[in-house]
Image (spheres, coloured by chain):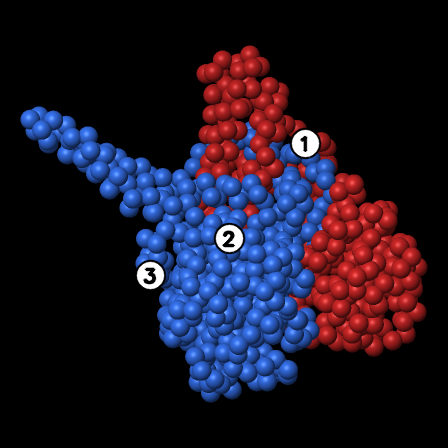
Amino acid sequence: MQELPKIARERLAAGPVSSPHLDANLISAFAVHALLADERQRVIAHMAVCEDCRAEVQLVISAMWPGARATEAVRDLTPESASRFSWQRLLRWRPMAAAAGVLAISVAFWVATRQPASRGVHPAASVNLASKAEPPSSPAASAGATAARSQVPAPSGEAKQTLTRALPSSHENAVASNSEMTKGLGRDAASEVSGQLVSGKAQSPEQRETEVRPTGALAVAAPPPPAPVPASPEANRASAPPAVQPASAQAASTSIEAAAAPARGVQGAPTFLSLQKNLAAPSALAPRRMAQLATQPGVRWAVSGDATSGQPIPGAVQKSLDGGGTWQPVPVAPGVTFRVVFALGRDVWAGGVAGAFYHSSDDGEHWSAVSLATSGGTAAGNIVSIQFADASHGVVRTSSGQTWTTSDGGTTWQLK
Amino acid sequence: MGSRFRGNDDAANDATTDYKAGGPQMSSSEASTTTESGPSTGSRLPPHVQDELWRRSGAVEYGIGVAEFGSILEHIAAKYLPADESRSSNSVAEFCRTLRLQDLALARACAAGNEPAWNAFLIRYRESLSRSALAIAREESAARELADSVYAELYGLEGPDGRRVSKLAYYDGRGSLEGWLRSVLAHEFTDRLRRERRLVSLEEQVEAGHDFRAPEAESTVPPDQRLEAATDEALAAVSAEERLLLASYYLDGRTLAEIAVLLGVHESTVSRRLDRTVRAVTKNIIKGLRRRGLSREQAREALEVDVRDLAVDVGRHLRGARSEPGTVLSTESKE
């Protein structure tokens, strides 16, 4: 990297601190990217000239336990960075598209020149070849353009069937690969992931819109309604060409999302199942959106949105009895911020910040705290995923990369 | 712990009355903006929103009524939202919905001396507070000391009028209470560090027979005014965020990864932007120098000479800047 001239450093350090210092409210909100855009600008402007506040913010960030950044960091609110990121994505794929284009043209040229003069240059041939060569490149390019995040609306009837059968195993695969990754990456890399995380979030405005739902549902456990799915506008916009599907299914970070995505203000929540792929944010992105299928018709469980999406209580467990039309908060434990809820039959599991983990065996009427602990240690980080194959076998994952399993319905847990 | 507040109910009630009246409750400079620009008619929360948020906050558990909680929210909104015509009761409601209402209710109830709230607070945050303290102080006894002093502030220090003011009254529900506590710890910690540093550097100077005269220019060559002016100009042209990048990287010695987490962007982005900014600054300094009559060669030279002795000099300069007697004595504290 080019060096900054010494005089520039001197003058940089000499800048007067004019604005008032940051208080704990602003610092803590800044550290988790929860400030409004113009507030954030003011905070950054102050930090740019104030060594003390920079040091303090850095201290706060470094004191967050590993994984906290990933899960507490909500999203970068600045529209500037959103556009920047989508551009980067585009640019990243541009060489590939360009290469494909060049290839197509050169093949066309080669074919054209190979044609003996007796037949003359066959314009159609070159055009054909060019157009044949183009298509493969354009899905790739558009996959990049949609910021590596494709949503494929599927008819919910058949998707439900395949999903209910495939979910436990495929999900465990995803969990396994995720935790492997996290282990492999180690602590330092976790921060990197969180950086990508935010960028992954910032880059796709469509996704942001789908997240901001009137009901506040981010993670929804829902059996899809029998009726064929009216594709929501977001789904349409975000839908990718079919060619992308296999790729997204293979991706290590594929997560299956059964998201209730009512178009804003629309009651009765049209549901779509989507396969979502996120190259940039493998594990930690998933918890908020990860959803599970419940077995009771009409009953859905959700965790309300985060602080910046304008949702009422961030991280509160909610329940809907009418398929997502209306939502009631469920008092699980006061003051606990939840990340994920999983329902299977009348068993409901809810997990959240700092290893908070609760279970209800009566459809959410009564809750009891579950302790994730063995003689070898306790849960570290936030609970970001809960998955039960049946009433007794379950897997819980934390933001620190731990994987806990139970085979006796949650009475005892093993740390992998 | 809560028993410390048993005899203090009156004070707590007074505090809540103040909220309702919109009068001065917070005494620190931090909160002065709140009291000056109390909620005007334009920024009131509609009653049904007040009611909704109050119910969500669980404030009733700690004996905080709707009106009281609504008033707390309005004060917070008045503090953060710009006081112009864009601040409507709608925008206030929207803003208030983004707050951590439960955390807020708990914190303010603790500040008012509510015993169940204190119990809940201790159960929930005692562990994370000591964990954060350890992460910040990195050493057990120092961490305990740090946590203790923050606890003292949370319980409340008696002000000059004898009324106990808890630090928790300043929590505004932006971000989690846990995060706020972490920030309070960090602030306390850097404050202490600064105080110690000041003491140590003063002692060192006295021992070294420092004569507390204004420091003479380090180099024999007087700094070129043109170079300084051109540099200031070039630095003024970069955005605040880019300036923060430069300062974090070149002054604080942060890694790209740390800055990436700070700004919530990817490391490669930080690296690219840093590189771009450095180039732009360098180019603009040279431009500025040329405008001031230097030839391109002279301008380059003026910069390059500096670059060469940079490695040795900057660290010394930065340390020196901190221990200059003038700045040390006048920097009483951060406030």
Give amino acid for label 3: Gln
In the image, which lettered chain appears red? B
Residue B15 placed where, x, y %?
A: 88, 63
Chain A: colour as depicted: blue
Q: Residue beneath label 1, please?
A: B215
Which of B278 and B301 lies nearest the eye of the viewer? Answer: B278
- Left or right position of A3 against B222: left
Q: Nearer the viewer, mark 1 or mark 3?
A: 3
Mark number for residue A250?
Answer: 3
Q: Residue at x 48, y 30 (%)?
A: B279
Secondary structure of the residue carrying numbered label 3 = helix
Secondary structure of the residue carrying numbered label 2 = helix
Q: Chain of mark 3?
A: A
Q: CA distance from mark 1 to mark 3?
A: 66 Å
Give amino acid for label 2: Glu
- Say which label, 2 or 3, has the lower sequence index: 2
- Left or right position of A139 against B271: left
Q: Nearer the viewer, mark 2 or mark 3?
A: 2
Q: Residue beneath label 2, please?
A: A234
Q: Nearer the viewer, mark 1 or mark 2?
A: 2
